[in-house]
Image (cartoon, helix red, strand yellow):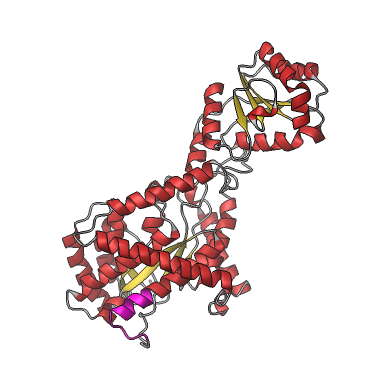
Amino acid sequence: MLLDLAPVVLDAPSATTAVAEAFLALPGAKHPDSNLGIDPLGVMLREIPLAVDEAVAELRTLARKADQNDVRAIVVDATAAHDLGASDAQELGWSIAVGVAYLRWLTDHGLSVTDAANQVEFRYAATDEQFPTIAKLRAARVLWARVLELSGVSTGSTTAGIAQRQHAVTSRPMLSKYDPYVNMLRGTVAAFAAGVGGADAVTVLPFDSANGRPDAFGRRIARNVNHLLIDESHVAAVADPAGGAYAVEQLTADLAAAGWAEFQQLESEWEGGHDFDPFRARIAAVVEKREADIARRKRPLTGVSEFPNLGETLPERDADPLNDRVRRYGASFEALRDEPAAQPVFLATLGTIAQHTARATFVSNLLAAGGIAVEVAGATAGVEDLVAAYRSSGGRPVVCLAGTDAAYGEWGAAAIAALREAGAQHVIIAGKPDAVDAEVDDAAALGVDALAFLTATREKLA
């Protein structure tokens, strides 16, 4: 094995020390950008059992061995926080707090600050939110430079490892299990943002990672994303291409300030030991807000909460335990899709196709996000046409009206009464509930809590 040709970064949180020792024993394991992947605080944040005193001792020992082998020992893996649902600012604050803790551990055992800093690499998540990812990586370098300045490291130092070395990995939470091919686009945007943001190394996760262990095709596509960005888009040819843009500079400054505030909060909480509960609680608040936005589709997820394909066949992959450590952004919608298929909803379309198509498309898309198909009445001229189409469909228990406000006002009430008489048990209206002069059981309009609506609808279809 020619381990000196390309950097190797270890990622084995449940057996980090043993794997690191085994790697160092390999002949030729001496690439200056290789890393043993030691990150005890990240392991503990993931709730993997680890004793702090033991971790400190192992960190010191492996740091010395790594220095002798011209490799790095420590990874500050901020994706440990990101995978739990942390915001960009929380991810930054966590990384700086952990980096400072490792500097203290190493300098307390005889290493200089410079030597200790040379042992640290930072790993950040790159998401498909392009500009926040660019700004996050730029802000991270600003914060770490400030830490080193306060630690007495000369800002003019040319020592190779003093500048923050960044390894960006495309986000696991942003990946979707359903319509996984959209993940190719997500990964490409994230990798582009990481490159523009100045990451030293970028790992693109295969598009099928959320479905289990990626196959050869998924891994090949992931590798090619980097090749395309470097060799054809020349992302690596320009230093800080986003620098000077007001929006990026302002977002960088805002994230740096918010990340520093989170770092100070963690510092105060860790004075008596490493208590992660307050930090987890703050992450939980961010997750709750994000989940609410996703549920109301303020943050649309293509292929999951928007434009789902009920007829797709998911790629079959072996289970990957790494996915158990991550809550994907679309997990709640995916859970609905994972349930046994529900019987269809009868879509009672009022008027011509041109008249009802807007609301029919909206509600069909919404129902599909919960794994619910529709049977469409088609063009109708009145109540008799609508009831005839309903009876020919088999008389579904749930009916949804879709039409214009004018149609609702003209014959919506009569249509609801006739459909209930024909056997409809649960009547929904696409639009505001007061758009029709009759009692409806539910309504689907812009801003509706889609998860609550879909859960209730599936219960009525059971």
> Residue 224: percent from the left, percent from the top?
57, 64
> Residue 85: percent from the left, percent from the top?
42, 52
Residue at the image position 57 percent from the left and 79 percent from the top: 237
Corner quadrant of residue 155: bottom left
- Residue 250 as seen in the image, left or right of residue 381: left
Task: Determine the residue located farthest toward the top in the rendered image.
Answer: 421
When the figure is inspected, residue 269 is found, relative to residue 210, above or below; the finding is below
Corner quadrant of residue 34: bottom left
Choose between 162 and 275: the one closer to the eye: 275
Residue 72 seen: yes
> Residue 27: percent from the left, percent from the top?
30, 74
When the figure is inspected, residue 171 is found, relative to residue 389, above or below; the finding is below
Q: Is residue 204 shown in magenta?
A: no
- Residue 56 as seen in the image, left or right of residue 352: left
Choose between 360 and 372: the one closer to the eye: 360
Choose between 434 and 15: the one closer to the eye: 434
- Residue 241 as seen in the image, left or right of residue 418: left
When the figure is inspected, residue 425 is found, relative to residue 154, above or below; the finding is above
Q: Is residue 150 shown in magenta?
A: yes
Split into 4 quadrants, where in the image is the N terminus? Answer: bottom left
Corner quadrant of residue 371: top right
When the figure is inspected, residue 363 is found, relative to residue 42, above or below; the finding is above
> Residue 273: percent from the left, percent from the top?
20, 59
Which contiguous range is marked in magenta? 144-155
Residue 223 seen: no
Residue at the image position 62 percent from the left and 72 percent from the top: 233
Report how many numbered discs are placed on residues in the image. 0
- Residue 23 as seen in the image, left or right of residue 243: left
Residue at the image position 47 percent from the left and 57 percent from the top: 171
